[in-house]
């Protein structure tokens, strides 16, 4: 279109020039006492030349006016490119663990880019990695001033509050963040942890209910967390004297956290306190199928504390039958057989436990039970003490017994609790065998201790049925 217009204009100019050449005309100009005589074509050419010169002068003036702006824009582009390069270098340095270098790049990027959110975030993370809590806090606070980066600033400040133990500030900031992004997984975890630290279990229950509604947490993790929270609510109800409410909460907690023995044990104790011994026995038997634990075995025997030792051993067989493959079933039966002075039965169960495949050999508890058996059963006290001493020496370097281990930090705990005493994580304690750590001196002594010979388990005769007392009858109260 522009080419066609140019051709039309050129043609018009040629026609006009031809017309003026054929009809030159005469123009007379008188100005200031001077007279100028010329042709019409010359006058038109002079006017055209003047217009062209004026236009060129105007264009030159406009170009000169645009030069400072172009220079400023060019400098801004160079600053932005340099700032972006510094920002990239800072992120790489942060990923490499060079916090001081990353912080220098962050300062340069912030100076060049004028405090953009990414520069502030890099400065905050670098300062936090370097241990400068105050500088990190200032950078995170600066992010709060912008609506698009407010959530980033809140996340950083909540993390600082958690690390500093300032739970009140952390909860206040978490509630503010929940209004912006209630479906953030890290926020749900943080709110749950803060509520657990404060002992505010109703708030923890509400947090999990909202998470379930929004499907934020995985289903299995959600169930387990709910079981732990309901267990704590049951304990609180028990302390307030409402045993029936506590028992109802404990039943739900046991059903949700099936791999933990503590909620089941608590539930059974509440049922015993309410006089519902049959229901308590069923609760323990149900828990034994998924979480066999020494506390459950002891509580099972407490249901009928006046029973003689043979009757206790017989009742424990009912419990072990719920999970016969579990190592704890054999150990519990052996322990009770020792208490009932049923040496052959105790040796049979211990032999089965020793014969079970274990990469690190018998556990300490198993070695101690063997030492107790050798000392109690031996006809010759001196020989029995010698055999028991060998097992005691072996126990020094034996594999540790299961205990509650934090899956986050790996610390051992003798008792279960909702929060890890080492790292403060929520619902991370699991009943499992901890890593085998033995002092060098004890390991050398255990290596020199020879294990006493054990006959195959099949060679130990089983205790005749008549040797056990009849299975105790529970009360007839309805469950």
Image (tube, grey):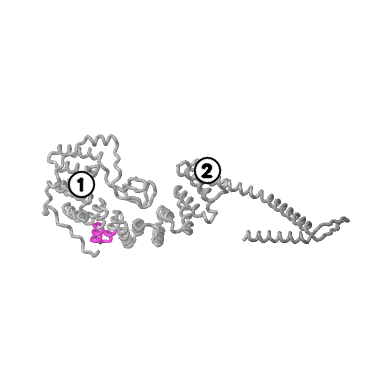
- Mark 2 = which residue? 105
Between the residue at mark 1 and the residue at mark 2, the CA separation in whole angstroms equals 60 Å
Q: Nearer the viewer, residue 104 or 174?
A: 104
Q: Nearer the viewer, residue 357 or 398?
A: 357
Judge the density around disc 1: few (<14), some (14-19), many (≥20) Cα neighbours within 10 Å.
Answer: few
Name the side, left or right, on which 414 lies relative to 208.
Answer: left
* Residue 5 location (% of width, % of height): 65, 61
Quarter holding residue 50: bottom right
> Start and end of the magenta stretch?
270-285
Q: Would residue 58 be counted in the magenta stretch?
A: no
Judge the density around disc 2: few (<14), some (14-19), many (≥20) Cα neighbours within 10 Å.
Answer: many
**In the image, which disc is placed on residue 356?**
1
The structure residue drawn at horizontal position 74% and vertical position 53%, both measured from the top left corner, is 53
Quarter holding residue 185: bottom left
Between circles 1 and 2, the one closer to the viewer is 2
Dot 1: element: loop
The structure residue drawn at horizontal position 61% and vertical position 47%, both measured from the top left corner, is 74
* Residue 265 location (% of width, % of height): 28, 55
* Chief secondary structure of the magenta portion: helix
* Residue 7 location (% of width, % of height): 65, 59
Considering every residue shown, the one lying at the far front of the view is 22
Q: Nearer the viewer, residue 61 or 333?
A: 61
**Could one spot residue 204 in this view of the protein?**
yes
């Amino acid at each position: 279109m522009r080419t066609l217009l140019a051709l039309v204009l050129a043609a018009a100019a040629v026609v006009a020039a031809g017309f003026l050449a054929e009809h030159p005309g005469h123009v007379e100009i008188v100005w200031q006492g001077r007279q100028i005589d010329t042709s019409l074509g010359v006058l038109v050419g002079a006017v055209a030349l003047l217009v062209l010169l004026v236009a060129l002068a105007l264009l030159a003036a406009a170009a000169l006016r645009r030069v400072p702006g172009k220079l400023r824009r060019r400098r801004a582009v160079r600053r932005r490119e340099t700032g972006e390069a510094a920002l990239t270098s800072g992120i790489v340095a942060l990923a490499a663990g060079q916090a001081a270098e990353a912080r220098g790049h962050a300062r340069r990027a912030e100076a060049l880019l004028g405090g953009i959110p990414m520069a502030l975030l890099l400065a905050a993370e670098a300062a936090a990695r370097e241990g400068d809590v105050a500088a990190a806090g200032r950078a995170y606070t600066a992010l709060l001033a912008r609506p698009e980066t407010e959530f980033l600033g809140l996340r950083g400040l909540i993390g600082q509050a958690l690390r500093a133990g300032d739970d009140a500030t952390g909860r206040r900031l978490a509630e503010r963040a929940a209004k912006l992004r209630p479906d953030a997984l890290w926020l749900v975890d943080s709110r749950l942890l803060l509520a657990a630290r404060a002992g505010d279990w109703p708030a923890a229950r509400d947090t999990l209910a909202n998470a379930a509604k929004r499907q934020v947490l995985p289903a299995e993790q959600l169930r387990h967390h709910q079981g732990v929270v309901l267990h704590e609510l049951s304990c609180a109800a028990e302390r307030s004297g409402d045993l029936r409410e506590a028992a109802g909460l404990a039943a739900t907690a046991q059903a949700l956290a099936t791999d933990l023995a503590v909620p089941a044990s608590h539930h059974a104790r509440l049922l015993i306190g309410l006089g519902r011994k049959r229901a308590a026995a069923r609760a323990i038997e149900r828990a034994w199928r998924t979480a066999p634990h020494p506390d459950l075995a002891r509580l099972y025997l407490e249901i009928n504390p006046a029973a003689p030792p043979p009757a206790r051993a017989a009742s424990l067989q009912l419990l072990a039958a719920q999970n016969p493959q579990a190592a704890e079933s054999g150990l519990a039966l052996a322990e009770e057989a020792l208490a009932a002075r049923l040496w052959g039965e105790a040796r049979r169960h211990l032999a089965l436990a020793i014969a079970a495949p274990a990469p690190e050999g018998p556990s300490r508890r198993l070695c101690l039970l063997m030492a107790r058996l050798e000392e109690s059963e031996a006809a010759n006290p001196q020989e029995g003490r010698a055999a028991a001493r060998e097992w005691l020496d072996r126990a020094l370097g034996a594999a540790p017994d299961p205990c509650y281990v934090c899956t986050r930090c790996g610390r051992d705990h003798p008792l279960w609790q909702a929060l890890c005493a080492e790292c403060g994580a929520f619902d991370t304690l699991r009943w499992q065998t901890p890593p085998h750590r033995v002092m060098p001196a004890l390991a050398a002594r255990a290596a020199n201790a020879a294990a006493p010979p054990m006959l195959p388990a099949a060679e130990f005769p089983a205790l005749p049925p008549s040797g056990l007392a009849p299975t105790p009858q529970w009360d007839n109260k309805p469950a």
